[in-house]
Amino acid sequence: MAPPLPLILLLVFTGGCSSGGGGWSVTYISSHICALEGSSLVIPCTYTYPSGHQVKEAFWTRTTSGTGIVPPNLIQYLGDKQHNCTVRLTHVKQTDPRMYIFKIISNIKNKTWIGKPGVTLNVTDLQVEASKKVKVGDSVTLTCKTTCRLTDTSTFIWLKNMKSLRNEDTDTLVLPSVRREDAGIYSCSVQGHDLISPEYYLNVMHPPEKTLVVVSPSGEIVEGDSVNLTCSSDANPPVQKHTWFKEKSTIGSGNIYRITTIRSDHGGEYKCKVSNAHGMKYSNAVILNVTYAPRNVSASISSSGVIVEGDPVNLTCSSESNPPVHIYSWFKETQTSSVGSGQSFRALENGLFYCVAQNKHGSQRSAAVAVMFDGGQNTLLYCVAGIITGLGGLLLVFMILFICRKNQRSKNIRGEQENDSTNQDMSKTYDDHSKNIYTNVIPACSISQSVCESLTDVECNYNIYKNLDPVDMCPEDDVYCTPDVLYDDPSECMYSNVQIL
């Protein structure tokens, strides 16, 4: 950019300034000089003196009285004692501006002649100034300013972040439509000189850009964790307001949104909105995927009604979890080891069955379902009851009786080819029905002796019968036994569709 050593500037001007009288004269090329701080320059000068005199001393001074000799580290006299009074100023500083005068001392009586008015030196630095504060899209002018107009014809050099800008050689730099990329550190210098202006930061204001949400900690989010959502944005001036949204609902403000104990219902889409004096911006949405162990686990029977004896009962396990359940295990109450696996299970025997659902975060078991097979010849009847932990046995029994009585009513009738012989038996009346052994009597739901004994004011024979048709009035109670009423003891009425073995 600039040579390592100061460039000596030879000042050559049109016209000049002279002072003299009585044969004494001095000619200065210019009476005013403006030089850059730190530069060196040569000031051409000529002089004359009367005949008969000889020049004893010739020098430059900064004062009109006394000798006023300038220190040799500033001025170097290049002239002679004849007619040349040229001088060189080296590395001028801000303290050097003043008037410099050429003096002659004659050999006759040490007569001194002063070449008034002399040459005035001004020393300037460089400063970059902008026309105004700018925002994106504005036009701005940068000026490389000096405190005086440089005497020499100068070529200016513009730098951005200490790199030269091409095709910019004037003291002004115009940016017609400012972009964010134009922001930076600008400085200027003059070609051939070491001096560089102080740095000027061009601050380009703009609305928020590059707005995004960062989730911390990163990685998998497990129910119960603490999660921070941080909203960041590139804006000038900085963002003044942050607003948080979940889906379309406003949920908070500030650049950080904290969830101290996250739940599954915290999962969803989050984004933030930021704004400053020049505009606003929404971030892209982030999805919080909250993982958790299985819950709401339940076992159910997937078929209903009367099933032909020998067919299996299909049980299904359902649950809510994230990630999905990867292991389903089936157990029978009173047994410690599993009896099956998979979301579906085929039960082939009576009992209470439950399932356990498991993913990598934990497991949960379901309530039990009861599978009951009838003891008859060719019909399978099952009853289902949810066994809820902590409920008493009596409530369980009443649930079983209610479901069985309401849903398991059917008839099992012999084929048409047996109707005649059966009708003959149905026309008979027996004195003591409890002494006969009946066929085609189907228990609606088998219950255990212990359950039966827990019932109060109920006469049990451990089976509740159905599929019995009344044939006559009950001899003792004087009431009819209808097909919709089930009795604990079939001996209380006279039945049809039964056969004595």
Image: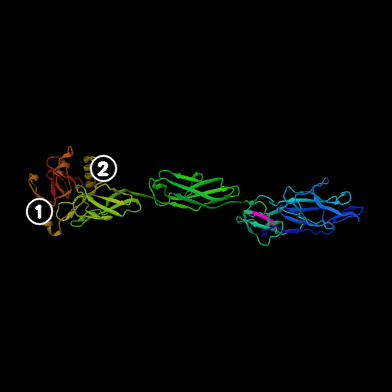
Identify residue for label 2. Answer: 389
Is the residue marked by circle 1 packed among few (<14), some (14-19), or many (20+) residues within 10 Å? few
Q: What is the three-letter code of the residue carrying label 1?
A: Gln
In the image shown, does 462 or 350 lie closer to the viewer?
350
SS for callout 1: helix
Numbered badge on residue 174: none
Report if the CB atoms under discs 2 and 1 are less than 8 Å apart.
Answer: no
The magenta segment is 186-190
Q: What is the three-letter code of the residue carrying label 2?
A: Thr
**Where does residue 494 sit, x and y in percent of width and height?**
12, 46
**Quarter where residue 189 is shown:** bottom right
Q: Is residue 29 magenta?
A: no
SS for callout 2: loop
| Residue 108 seen from this side | yes
Ranked by sequence position, the earlier of labels 2 and 1 is 2
**Where does residue 322 sit, x and y in percent of width and height?**
36, 52
Q: Residue furthest right?
A: 22
**Where does residue 488 sit, x and y in percent of width and height?**
15, 43
In the image shown, does 403 or 185 lie closer to the viewer?
185
